[in-house]
Amino acid sequence: MEEKEMKNPKLPCKGPVPQDMLEILMNGIFAFAMTLIVKNNIPLPSGNVSEDIYFFIEFFLSIFFDGFSFIFTFILLAIFYILAFEIMRHCVFIDRFCVYLIFGFLLTIIFIPLSSLLWSISDVPIPYGILFHANILISGLILLCLWVHIFKLPGIIRKSTTKEYINNLSFRISVFPLTALVGILIDGNEISFGIVPIIILYLVPIVMCVRYARDF
């Protein structure tokens, strides 16, 4: 009996990686990315003492406008976080292909704040809009591929997951890569370059994702 158990050990979890440990890693990556957007978007006051009123006005105006950028990026990451964990909560287990897709998705999440940092420190004119749209496009496509892979396999997705929920979540994920594709077409055209601000453009999928969130 013992020899048989040694040949066929009972694994404590299904899949190559414990799902709860992978979720902990996802929490850490998102926390790291959200920390970076604070560092990149919220300037800190210098250590120099100044009584110049114009210095304070300029500083607080920069805080005000950079605050919009921070809030936008934070909300965008929060939406991706919610979508990713909605997928995880409807998995019985994750197979090896899921693990590869999740690691690819997390890598793109890290690059969202890093691309803005690269744009701010570089002396060379970098098309930040194109970088940002491409990043969101890849993140959305990987997340969509993960969700399609999961709901196509009966052994992975929970039996209680309804067809309505599958369609709803698929729609909410799809709006982000579609918006990013529109952004690439706009910013990639010299005639219409920068005609639609990034915050305004992505406000549409963010509102749609929140508006059509459902628990089936």
Image: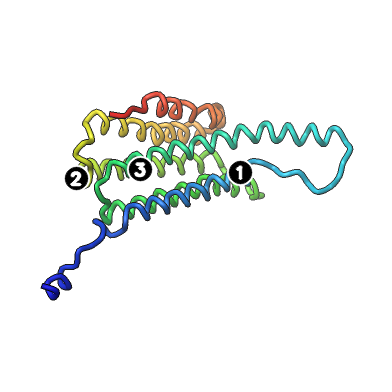
On the rendered structure, is 171 left or right of 202? left
Quarter of the image for residue 164 reads top left
Q: Amino acid at mark 3?
A: Leu
Q: Where does the image place residue 39, in percent across and percent down from the top left?
A: 63, 46
Q: Amino acid at mark 1?
A: Val
Residue bearing the label numbered 3? 143
Secondary structure beneath disc 1? helix
Q: Amino acid at mark 2?
A: Leu
Secondary structure beneath disc 3? helix
Instruction: Give the alpha-carbon distance from disc 3 to disc 2, as whole Å.
Output: 16 Å
Question: Residue at the spot x=18%, y=47% of the render?
Answer: 155
On the rendered structure, is 213 left or right of 129? left
Q: Which numbered tag is attached to residue 38?
A: 1
Give the total of numbered labels: 3
* Label 3, residues with CA under 10 Å away: few <14, some 14-19, many ≥20: many
Report if the CB atoms under discs 3 and 1 are less than 8 Å apart. Answer: no
Instruction: Give the alpha-carbon distance from disc 3 to disc 1, as whole Å.
Output: 24 Å
Q: Nearer the viewer, residue 3 or 145?
A: 3
The first of marks 3 and 1 along the sequence is: 1
Q: Nearer the viewer, mark 3 or mark 2?
A: 2
Residue bearing the label numbered 2? 153
Secondary structure beneath disc 2? loop
Quarter of the image for residue 69 reads top right
Q: Where does the image place residue 170, in percent across and percent down from the top left?
A: 30, 34
In the rendered image, which quarter contains the C terminus? top left
